Image (cartoon, grey):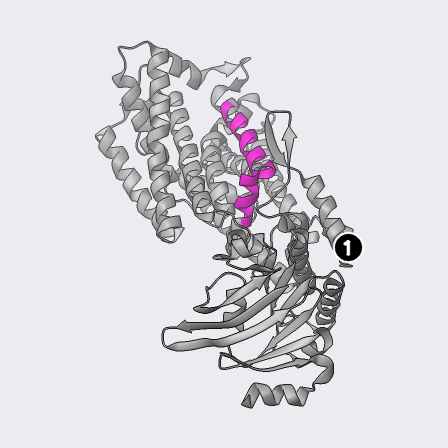
């Protein structure tokens, strides 16, 4: 579904990406690994429309991808989940899932008001479809009362509700406790079974080996390793990250 | 959640305890009732109207994580502009003069609101500083327009509006305030505009990512705040048949106290119009109550000042508890 070919990007004199190529299938989980400054962030920012590449090309669902802004990328179904930046803590689950795109209903035929019933119902359905457990009593509470993992799950369900086909997750488990990390990994599994393509950045090799199908290792802006998870080992990954 | 229950109950507790306090004082000291007295109730509601109007506007701003310190003098500015325009049209039909005066004043008073919004949303000046500057500007302009004196208006319709009681019971300023309260509550709780106000106060970054035009929204919020200050200025002029630049001077403290007593958070993201209504009633009860039991009026400022500090302390401890519980 995504094909990146020979993408390079400079920032001033710094070559952040040097002829990087990669691809992703629908229903595949690709882990991006590499040291700080290896180019992971630059790569996902190019895919999500934050930066434009200097050279090289991107194709998405068989079409050339030219997203000039995150909003355009999102409209194409490419959604980035940043940890903890995504939700308004003081709003409830439905309000967060629908933020900026609230369903409206007529009020006495005079004006339009937010249809909270619909937001609640649809939120319940999308959470259910992803096997996300949030108690009924918490659905109409501010999401600050929920755990980090539940909040992460809400951010992901919002993307799915709005038809994301390609999810980019930046360190989705970094701020979470171990049981919560496991839930997020289960959710990634569930998304894979629904044919969502996932790119996820992580420093945690345990998570990478638990959740992904393939791993792409970057070092100093170049791809230095690309392996199927089933055919590689932690030792090999670490050695590629360090010495390329 | 327990905390949210406390948050919604606490303004009522405040209102109840103040009512009981003055009721007991009045009975013990003067053997009379404080609350079961139509004149007192009318006076409290009338007292509450002006700080409430200012408070409603600034509730929107505070929910979005801002503050507007210019409202008091924006109100005074509106009062003198209104009085000056309306009295300069003294030769016209009183209704025409009044109509032109109202429209022109509301348009003019939007200017300080727009400038506030532009400074804060466009130039990223902290709301506290930007609106403090506007406090000075509006104050100066008010005195300049009024030439340093109170501007009298001789308009019979305006006089009627300011002093008539509907069915001999409800003063028109109170009625207007009540209608405005309902509209503001509707906008804040039922519309996208209200929802985005909460979202911006809760997480500005998330609001931006959700495609909300945060800049435009912020600009509108400060215009709303100025608009309510303008309305308060009109009502002041109607009640006293005169406009004064210092009309809103003591009301800045009262109105912001009303918002915080009403349960809004200093950190943004929470607050309700009906909370501010209760807050304004608490302030009015304290002020009128102190007059009623014959305490010197200077104590009012002290009492309201303490109330603000207590309200923000409670808010802080609530926030600390909820962050600790994460």
User: Which residue is at 68% across, 40% downward?
Assistant: A116
Q: Is residue A171 visible?
A: no
Q: For this view, does B37 lie left or right of residue B164?
A: right
Main secondary structure of the magenta stretch? helix
Task: Name the residue tied to disc 1.
Answer: A129
Q: How many numbered discs, if any? A: 1
Of residue A122 and residue B3, the one placed in the foreground of this image is: A122
Magenta stretch contains residue B185? yes
User: Which residue is at 38% across, 44% downward?
Assistant: B117
Placement of A122 over or under A143, stated as above or below: above
User: Which residue is at 71% across, 52% downward?
Assistant: B1
Magenta stretch contains residue B110? no
**Image quarter in which the C terminus of chain B is found:** bottom right
Q: Which residues are magenta?
A: B176-199
Q: Is residue A142 visible?
A: yes
Give me the chain letter of mark 1. Answer: A
């Amino acid at each position: 579904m995504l094909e990146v070919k020979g993408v390079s990007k400079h920032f001033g004199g710094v070559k952040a990406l040097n002829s990087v190529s990669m691809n992703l299938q629908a229903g595949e989980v690709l882990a991006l690994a590499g040291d700080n400054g290896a180019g992971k962030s630059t790569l996902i920012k190019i895919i999500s429309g934050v930066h434009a590449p200097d050279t090289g090309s991107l194709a998405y669902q068989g079409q050339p991808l030219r997203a000039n802004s995150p909003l355009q990328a999102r409209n194409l179904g490419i959604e980035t989940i940043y940890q903890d930046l995504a939700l308004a803590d003081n709003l409830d689950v439905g309000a967060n899932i629908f933020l900026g795109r609230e369903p409206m209903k007529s009020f006495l035929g005079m004006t339009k008001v937010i249809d909270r019933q619909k937001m609640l119902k649809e939120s319940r359905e999308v959470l259910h479809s992803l096997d996300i457990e949030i108690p009924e009593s918490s659905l109409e509470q501010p999401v600050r009362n929920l755990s980090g993992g539940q909040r992460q799950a809400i951010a992901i369900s919002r993307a799915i509700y709005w038809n994301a086909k390609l999810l980019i997750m930046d360190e989705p488990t970094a701020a979470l406790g171990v049981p919560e990390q496991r839930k997020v990994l289960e959710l990634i599994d569930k998304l894979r079974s629904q044919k969502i393509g996932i790119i996820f950045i992580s420093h945690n090799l345990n998570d990478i080996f638990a959740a992904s199908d393939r791993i792409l290792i970057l070092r100093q802006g170049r791809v230095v390793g690309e392996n199927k998870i089933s055919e590689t080992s932690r030792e090999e990954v670490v050695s590629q990250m360090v010495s390329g | 959640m327990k905390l949210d229950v406390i948050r919604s109950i606490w303004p009522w507790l405040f209102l109840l305890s103040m009512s009981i306090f003055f009721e007991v004082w009045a009975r013990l000291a003067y053997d009379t009732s404080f609350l079961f007295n139509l004149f007192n109730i009318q006076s409290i509601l009338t007292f509450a109207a002006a700080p409430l109007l200012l408070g409603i506007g600034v509730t929107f701003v505070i929910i979005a994580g801002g503050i507007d310190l210019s409202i008091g003098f924006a109100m005074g500015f509106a009062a003198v502009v209104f009085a000056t325009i309306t009295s300069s049209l003294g030769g016209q039909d009183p209704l025409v003069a009044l109509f032109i005066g109202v429209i022109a004043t509301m348009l003019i008073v939007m200017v300080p609101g727009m400038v506030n919004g532009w400074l804060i949303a466009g130039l990223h000046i902290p709301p506290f500083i930007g609106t403090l500057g506007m406090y000075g500007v509006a104050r100066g302009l008010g005195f300049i327009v009024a030439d340093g004196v109170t501007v009298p208006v001789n308009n019979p319709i305006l006089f009627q509006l300011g002093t008539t009681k509907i069915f001999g019971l409800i003063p028109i300023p109170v009625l207007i305030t009540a209608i405005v309260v309902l509209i503001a509550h509707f906008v804040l709780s039922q519309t996208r505009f209200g929802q985005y106000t909460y979202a911006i106060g809760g997480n500005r970054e998330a609001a931006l990512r959700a495609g909300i035009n945060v800049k435009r929204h912020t600009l509108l919020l400060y215009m709303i705040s100025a608009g309510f200050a303008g309305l308060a200025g009109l009502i002041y002029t109607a009640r006293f048949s005169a406009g004064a630049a210092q009309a809103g001077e003591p009301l800045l403290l009262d109105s912001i106290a009303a918002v915080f007593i009403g349960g809004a958070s200093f950190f943004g993201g929470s607050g309700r119009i009906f909370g501010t209504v209760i807050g304004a009633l608490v302030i009015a009860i304290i002020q009128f109550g102190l007059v009623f039991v014959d305490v010197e009026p200077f104590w009012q400022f002290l009492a309201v000042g303490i109330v603000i500090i207590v309200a923000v302390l409670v808010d802080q401890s609530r926030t600390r508890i909820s962050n600790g519980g994460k």
